[in-house]
Amino acid sequence: MPVIFPATARAIYTKNNFMLRSIKELYGNKLGASDGDIGQVKDFYFNDQSWAVRYLVADTGTWLPGRQVLLSPHAFGKLHQAGKLLFVNLTRKQIENSPSIESHKPVSRQYEEEYYRYYGWPNYWQGDGLWGMTGFPILELPTKTLPDGRVTANSRQPGPTEAHLRSAQAVNGCHLQASDGIIGHICDFMMDDTSWAIHQLVIKTGHRFTGKEVQIPTNKVDRISYSDSTVFVNLTKAAVEQNPEHQLIPIGEVD
């Protein structure tokens, strides 16, 4: 399927020619299964150690009320978009019958194992790659699951017990603590549209209305304090200010 971008879609390109998409600009986009709409983009859950987005959180409205509907990047492959619609390589029935988790409940590794068994996707936590044995989510239809959700006998191999999943919505707005003081706050995340890895944090520095936005690489993050709503980086305030200014370019205008 070709990747179709609307005229309003924007991104930035890295020196290695990776396209980075703004997570903030994806919020509210509609989600289309292979047989109909399923809702819209509500949030993204990322691993705060690898910075890989592990799940898109769907707001399904009145279709599946009370449920937290998670969609793995395996269901998308590379982001396929037309207008404000993201294509999901699943049917509505597959999503409806997937393992249920209540809204506002944390995602445990036990739940993830059940979820991945149901769809028949390889476990991302088993292997040396960002996505297990590879650096990218697979792009193929999931294996047909058995009635009890089992796929293979070896799919129950133990893995790490802690998923380290964090909400992008919750981290957005956190203070940025440089080595010599607070310099601003997180206002966006820039995600590789192929690997689903967050490469850059967008920081609003200075005054909330008159300051500028700069990008800093995620490998400069030392730790995140969720109790203090603060992200600590191994940079001085001056070094943060010297990072590239954040500017999104309409995708259709990129050579």
Image (cartoon, grey):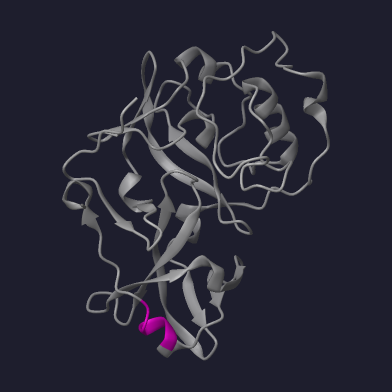
Q: Is residue 59 magenta?
A: no
Asked if residue 65 is positioned above or below residue 240 in the image, the reply reads: above
Q: Is residue 160 left or right of residue 247?
A: right
The residue depicted at 51 percent of the width and 80 percent of the height is 177
Prevailing secondary structure of the magenta residues: helix
Quadrant housing residue 127: top right
Percent across and percent down for residue 180 are: 52, 91
Percent across and percent down for residue 174 are: 47, 68
Quadrant housing residue 122: top right
In front: 130, or 222?
130
The residue depicted at 23 percent of the width and 45 percent of the height is 9
Q: Is residue 242 magenta?
A: yes
The residue depicted at 52 percent of the width and 29 percent of the height is 66
**Magenta region, residue range:** 239-243
Q: Is residue 54 left or right of residue 30?
A: right
Residue 152 appears in the figure:
yes
In front: 215, or 98?
215
Q: Is residue 18 left or right of residue 6?
A: right
Quadrant housing residue 202: bottom left
Percent across and percent down for residue 47 are: 60, 52
Q: Total marks drawn?
A: 0
The residue depicted at 51 percent of the width and 51 percent of the height is 197
Name the image quarter holding the N terminus.
top left
Residue 68 appears in the figure:
no
Q: Is residue 105 left or right of residue 39?
A: right
Percent across and percent down for residue 146 are: 69, 10
In front: 96, or 49?
49
